[in-house]
Amino acid sequence: PGGLLHTNIAGCTLFAAVSGSSAATLTTVGKMSIPELRRRGYPEYMIIGTLAGAATLGLMIPPSLTLIVYGVTINESITKLFMAGVIPGLVLAGLFMSYIVGWYYLRPSERPEQAPRQNLMQVIKDSRFLIPVILLVMVVIGSMYFGWATATEAAAVGVVGALLLAASQKSLTFETFTQSLMGATRTSAMIALILMGASFLSLSMGFTGLPRALAGFIDNMDLSPIVLIAALTVFYIILGMFLDGISSVVLTMAIVEPMIRQAGIDVIWFGIFIVVVVEMAQVTPPIGFNLFVLQGMTKHEISYIAKTAIPMVALMVLMVVILVIWPELATWLPETVRQSRS
């Protein structure tokens, strides 16, 4: 139930595992899905809303740039953070799909006409370019999870594998190759500059003693972890309305990290929590980044796009609640892999 709208969620989930970027996921999947879904008669608000929410999965599902920067900033294992993001990312994708199923049953008048079903052989034939990409993702992520390669080595394997796939599928041209190089260079340079600024901020904070004083202040208040998490949720949503996810993380970790450690909050769990909250901010007006990307793609008013994304924001709030109630969603897989290695 829900038809091709599920391709927005599934496509973003799969592409997020390749790109690690919310903007890249939104642009790539949106260019393919929006014209096709419009042609088949799906409601505009459902097309835009599901795409706005699902594109944020690029911030959580490995390889996630936000998780990489978070791990570097607090000196935590990138592999552990990647493993921690898998199950919550899939749960959030499941929540988005549940919303589509609910729409399908609650608003039958908006359903488009069903396309004729394809047989199994036709589906396999149409998926011949997709299956190698899925296998490449499994090899790259699996090599990190099982300790066969570091994050850097796995990234190199992914780059070489992607080039070979593009060449074999005749989609590798000089233009696409140079565009990929420039995109990777811009992203790497951006992260390096942000981390430089964050290091300077951290050093300044260290000299002033503010993080230690703030952690002591919170400790003296005897603030419960739940209250602290609620306060940080509001804080990061507001901050994320004006800053991108990576900037929100690196510019605040010097202050926030001592707070969460003082409160006894697991830093791996907190990494997943902060990504979900930053995801919310990406589709929250007035300056939710994904909203502006969608505005450029669909030519709708920003207020209309923000309205279509409200159900997805509500589901992300629900995801935060789920993480608080069941923190094992984020901590179980890294802990299980660690125990299996020891």
Image (tube, rainbow, N blue to C red):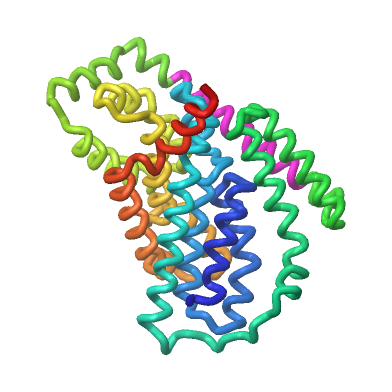
- x%, y% of residue 72? 51, 25
Residue for point 38% across, 74% down: 102
Q: Is residue 81 above or below residue 264?
A: below
Residue for point 44% across, 51% down: 282
Residue range of the region highlighted in magenta in the rendering: 179-200
- The residue sitting at the top extreme is 207
- x%, y% of residue 313? 36, 58
Q: Would residue 221 appear left or right of 266 to someone viewing this image?
A: left
Quadrant housing residue 205: top left
Quadrant housing residue 147: top right
The secondary structure making up most of the magenta span is helix
Residue for point 20% across, 18% down: 216
Q: Would residue 221 appear left or right of 252 to someone viewing this image?
A: left
Q: Is residue 173 above or below residue 120?
A: above
- x%, y% of residue 329? 39, 43
Q: Nearer the viewer, residue 120 or 287?
A: 120
- x%, y% of residue 59? 50, 45
Residue for point 69% across, 36% down: 185
- Magenta stretch: residue 187 in it? yes
Residue 103 in view: yes
Q: Is residue 15 above or below residue 301?
A: above
- Magenta stretch: residue 193 in it? yes
Total tally of numbered discs in the picture: 0
Residue 291 in view: no
